[in-house]
Amino acid sequence: MAEHLASIFGTEKDRVNCPFYFKIGACRHGDRCSRLHNRPTVSPTLLLTNMYQRPDMITPGVDASGNHIPPSQIQQHFEDFYEDIFEELSKFGEIENLSVCDNLADHLIGNVYAQFRETDQAAKALKGLQGRFYSGRPIIVEFSPVTDFREASCRQFEEKCCNRGGYCNFMHVKEIGRDLRRHLFGGYRSRHSRSRSRSRDREDYYYRKSSERGRERSKDRERSKDRRSSERDREDYYRRSPMRESSEERRAKIEQWNREKEGKEKEKGEKIE
């Protein structure tokens, strides 16, 4: 039973926990939702609710005064906001992902998701942002369960074919220009690249050292084997070759042989008589 509940947690089959809140950290039903919203007590991701205010929020392409706004000006307004938020949040730690929703539904409009590299960095940012304001509006910040932005994002929007439009229940992430992305995230990537390069250098160094130590141990084993082999050869030689006798020992042995020979000849002569 426990395995089954764990396997369906956060899915449409889960009748207890809200799958939309689990995936995107927001639900169109809000507190009136019939399923539970399990708010995390710690997470690497922060949600800044309804923080981005589009200049054409009421009518697309038209500002509050009824004047037409060109798309380039809307994009510039967004990138200025994005850069401001990134620079402020980066004071608390390294930002892995910063996503801003382009949806129109109340529970997603203007939501900013900031994913830090470490959870303690997110906790520091949460504490530092509480009670603060941006453009005259209070910042509403909380931990978010979102860690996989691919699951939270609308694939049809990325392919420019979402038929739900701005009222889709999945994130429509507003993109920034390539130059701005390189400017903001490039430093992190270069540091990671240098770190990986240093890591590879250390790995190569330790590999070479271990290889050298391995070769030295092999040579020591070969030398030890040669020494044992030569010692065994000497032992075999001495076992096969009798020790050289002294001259006194040889004379005594010859005298014994002569006596034995004389005794045999004497016995032979007595038998003949």
Image (cartoon, rainbow, N blue to C red):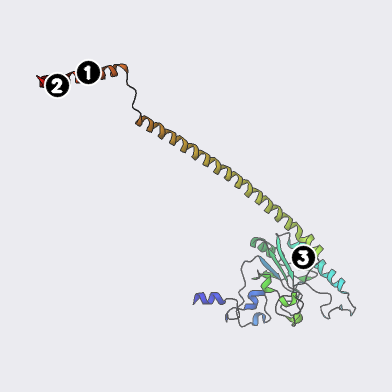
Would you call the spot at circle 1 few (<14 residues within 10 Å), some (14-19), or many (20 or more)?
A: few
Secondary structure at numbered mark 2: helix
Q: Nearer the viewer, residue 149 or 103?
A: 149
Left or right side of 25 for 158: right
Q: Give percent across and percent down for residue 245.
A: 32, 21
Task: Label 3: state its secondary structure.
Answer: helix
Res. 234 mark: none
Q: Which of labels 2 and 1 is toward the front?
A: 2
Q: Are marks 3 and 1 in contact (CB under 8 Å)?
A: no
Residue indicated by mark 3: 85
Q: Measure the alpha-carbon separation of dots 2 and 1.
A: 15 Å
Which residue is rendered at x = 66% and y = 48% of the image? 201
Q: Residue furthest front?
A: 272
User: How far is mark 3 from mark 1, CA to CA?
Assistant: 119 Å
Amino acid beneath label 2: Lys
Using the rendered view, name the quadrant where residue 171 is placed.
bottom right
Horizontal arrangement in the rendering, residue 204 relative to residue 172 (left or right): left
Amino acid at dot 3: Ile
> Disc 3 or 1, which lies upstream in sequence?
3
Q: Quadrant of the C terminus?
A: top left
Figure quadrant of residue 103: bottom right
Left/right of residue 233 with respect to residue 68 in the rendered view = left
Label count reads 3
Mark seen at residue 258: 1
Which numbered disc covers residue 268?
2
